[in-house]
Image (spheres, helix red, strand yellow):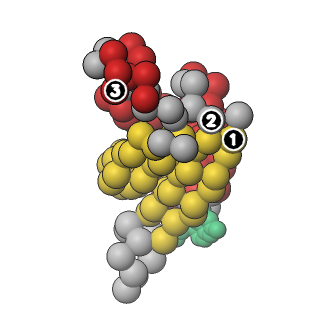
Amino acid sequence: MDKILIRQLKVDAIIGIHEWEKQNKQALILDLDLSFDCKPAAKSDDINDTLDYFKVCQQLTDFISASRFELIETLAEKSAQMILDYYPCKKVKLSLFKPEAINNTDAVGVRITRSQ
Ligand SMILES: Nc1nc2c(c(=O)[nH]1)N=C([C@H](O)[C@@H](O)CO)CN2
């Protein structure tokens, strides 16, 4: 199955189990693989025949930047479900990273795969 790819989408959000994380937004980074048949758009050369990754990034950014969750698992789940609800992709593989959470790491995170 073909995939529309989004790499290193950066969004700030309120996310975490500690009180200090609930006071200020922190950086999050997302990688997404959206399973979608790209043949029709490749034939028509028409944006309406594909998944517009600009719209996906814009909707994810709006949702995540307005969210307030404790666990990255919760935010990842809700983000993947929103994509499946709004876009005709068959499967979403979503990785969500917190680059500032744990000292001496580049990042910590979660990776989930959800299907229609
Ligand atoms: N599996 C998880 N473990 C932890 C999370 C999380 O969201 N999922 N969150 C925290 C803290 O908020 C941490 O990111 C900041 O100190 C700890 N463990």
Quadrant for the N terminus in the image? top right
Tag 2–tag 1 contact (CB < 8 Å): yes
Q: Residues within 10 Å of mark 2 (few under 14, many from 20)?
A: some
- Camera-near label (3 vs 2) is 3
The residue that disc 2 covers is 90
Among the 4 quarters of the image, the one containing residue 116: top right
Q: Is residue 20 above or below residue 79?
A: below
The residue that disc 1 covers is 115
Among the 4 quarters of the image, the one containing residue 51: top left
Among the 4 quarters of the image, the one containing residue 100: bottom left
The CA span between labels 3 and 2 is 18 Å
SS for callout 1: strand
Residue 85: x percent and y percent?
Answer: 64, 25
SS for callout 3: helix
Q: Earlier in the sequence, mark 1 or mark 3?
A: 3
Q: Earlier in the sequence, mark 2 or mark 1?
A: 2
Q: Nearer the viewer, residue 103 or 50?
A: 50
